Image (cartoon, rainbow, N blue to C red):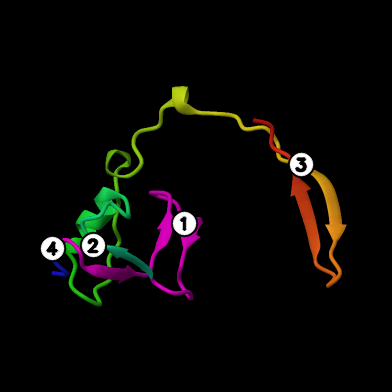
């Protein structure tokens, strides 16, 4: 078991899929592990709890229910954001392209 102690640095390699589907939503495979300090709320609670139950080097398929992640879907909380369009585009002296955006208050 990794440890239920707080203040331990743990690194994980992960692939996120929707339950029952194969499409990859997010992954850090091939990159540096995601590191977090236990007991500090740096990752979703359901994942931290399952990782704490694992042995170092162990692999697992972990399903985290919505209530132990970001919460159940709430249609009242959905917001539509304005489309972000550049108001000015340019190329700097080094040839790098840039976009300037204006966002109203």
Instruction: Select label 4 or label 1 by which is in front.
Output: 4
Q: Which residues are magenta?
A: 5-33
Q: Position of residue 84 (x, y in %)?
A: 71, 40
Measure the alpha-carbon separation of dots 2 and 4: 12 Å
Instruction: Select label 3 or label 1 by which is in front.
Output: 3
Q: Going by the image, does 41 lie left or right of 92?
A: left
Instruction: Select label 2 or label 3 by which is in front.
Output: 3
Q: Disc 1 on helix, strand or loop?
A: loop
Residue at mark 2: 51
Residue at mark 4: 5
Residue at mark 1: 22
Q: Quadrant of residue 90?
A: bottom right
Q: Disc 2 on helix, strand or loop?
A: helix
Residue in the foreground of this view, choosing between 80 and 104 = 104
Which residue is at a point 39% across and 49% down the rendered structure image? 20
**Which mark, residue 85?**
3
């Amino acid at each position: 078991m990794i440890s239920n102690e707080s203040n331990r640095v743990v690194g994980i390699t992960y692939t996120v899929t929707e339950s029952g589907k194969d499409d990859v939503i997010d992954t850090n495979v091939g990159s540096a592990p995601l590191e977090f300090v236990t007991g500090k709320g740096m990752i979703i609670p359901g994942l931290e709890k399952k990782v704490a139950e694992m042995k170092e080097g162990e692999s697992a398929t972990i399903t985290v229910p919505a209530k132990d992640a970001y919460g159940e879907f709430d249609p009242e909380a959905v917001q539509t954001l304005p489309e972000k369009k550049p108001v000015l585009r340019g190329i700097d002296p080094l040839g790098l392209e840039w976009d300037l955006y204006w966002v109203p208050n």
